[in-house]
Image (tube, rainbow, N blue to C red):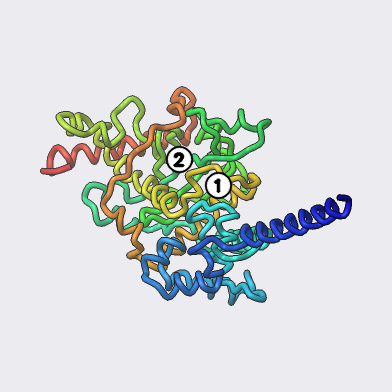
Amino acid sequence: MDDFDIELDEMELVAAAAGYYYYNSITKRPQRGMSLGGNGFMTQVLEGHDDVCREMFRMDKHIFHKLCDILRQRGMLRDTSGVMIEEQLAIFLNIVGHNERNRVIQERFQHSGETISRYFNNVLKAIKSLSREFLQPPPFSTPAEILNSKRFDPYFKDCIGVIDGMHIPAHVPAKDQSQFRNKKGLLSQNVLAACTFDLQFIFVYPGWEGSAPDSRVLRAVLDDPNQNFPQIPEGKYYLVDMGYANTQGFIAPYVGVRSHLHEFIGANQLPRNAKELFNHRHSSLRNVIQRCFDVLKTRFPILKVAPQYAFHIQRDIVIAACVLHNFIRREERNDWLFSAIEGVVAEELPDFEDQFDMQLACSMQEQIASASRDSIATGMWNDFINKWDEW
């Protein structure tokens, strides 16, 4: 009986070892449909239909190849054994373009989690380093989008862009959550952004707490020369919403007067005075920044959620996304996402901020800005009453 018990014990050990080996072989096996590996996946995307590349890499093939060439020629990334720059960039774009988890990317490209993380961070750093080149000050001449519209020219001929805040969901430690909770009760980072009427970002400043008012973020940027906010030429200005002061260099709508586009629908669509007409056209022109935000978040859905990264990585992802946005805009005017919003009025989201306190508007700069706004509104209204059949 003793010999029989020993023989059973040995059989049980063999069975356990065989089961363990079989289990490991099953769990390490790539999922069906994902067994192409990195090279196979890249070939499938880059040699397949254009729509496949757009879906997986969020850009057209020729733009993807040109970006790879830039990163290679400037030494920002380098090919490694088994992982070319093209695959490194694809890993990054799959993550930010689909908000994919590390484990999913491991299976798709057949690399370890550590390898995926390393290439993600390398590409993020490289693209962020292009920000000075692709986030450029606007031209000081009158934008074509204004010059070619009788509704906007000559009234807004000195306008060079639009500024607004964009709230991006944030993942932060419990001790910081009260500061990052915005007025909707959600955790977010407040991103200050400026854009041209050509749908390109001029300036991006992420990382502010969601509870910070837009006006405070802008003031902090203007007071800090290290932020390198583009110099505003004398007489030029940006359009801003009611969350900001109407001051020199920044023209806001009139407070206490209809301003949102949806308020001009139906029986009350016609403006009743100069201030309402000014606010309507101001809002129509300012809508470009909401369209910029919409394209950015549609292309990179990681900006719609709070990714589980350290906060400085979340901040850098916003900058990198804006760099890619501008790069695509410059390289392909007919990009499918930009084309989809041509002539579309983006939905105006309710402001997070309270209206700027007009009692504080007493500086000389604000008085000059108010006089300039009144002059624009008066001229616009006179032409509307005396010359215009449409508005």
Give me the residue at 65% from left, 46% from top.
310
Secondary structure at badge 2 equals loop
Q: Nearer the viewer, mark 1 or mark 2?
A: 1
Disc assigned to residue 205: 1
Q: Residue 172: x, y in percent? A: 63, 38
Q: Residue 256: which quarter of the image?
A: top left
Hey, which residue is sitting farthest left in the picture? 389
Pick whichever, 252 or 97, lies toward us: 97
Is residue 2 in view? yes
Residue 248 is tagged as 2
Q: Secondary structure at mark 1?
A: strand
Q: Position of residue 244 (x, y in %)?
A: 46, 34
Q: What amino acid type should be assigned to the residue bearing mark 1?
A: Tyr
- C-alpha separation, residue under disc 1 versus residue under disc 2: 21 Å
Residue 154 seen by the camera? no
Is label 1 in contact with label 2 (beta carbons under 8 Å)?
Answer: no
| Left or right of residue 9, residue 113 in this image | left
The residue located at (53%, 72%) in the rendering is: 68
Q: Residue flagged by tag 2: what amino acid is it? A: Gln
The quadrant of the image that shows the C terminus is top left
- In the displayed image of the protein, which residue is found farthest to the top? 359
Q: Earlier in the sequence, mark 1 or mark 2?
A: 1
Residue 228 x, y percent position in the rendering = 58, 52
Crowd tier of the residue under label 2, counting other residues whose Cα lies within 10 Å: few below 14, some 14–19, many 20 or above: many
At x 33%, y 65%, the residue is 334
Residue 308 versus residue 75 in the image, above or below: above
Residue lying farthest to the front in this orientation: 1
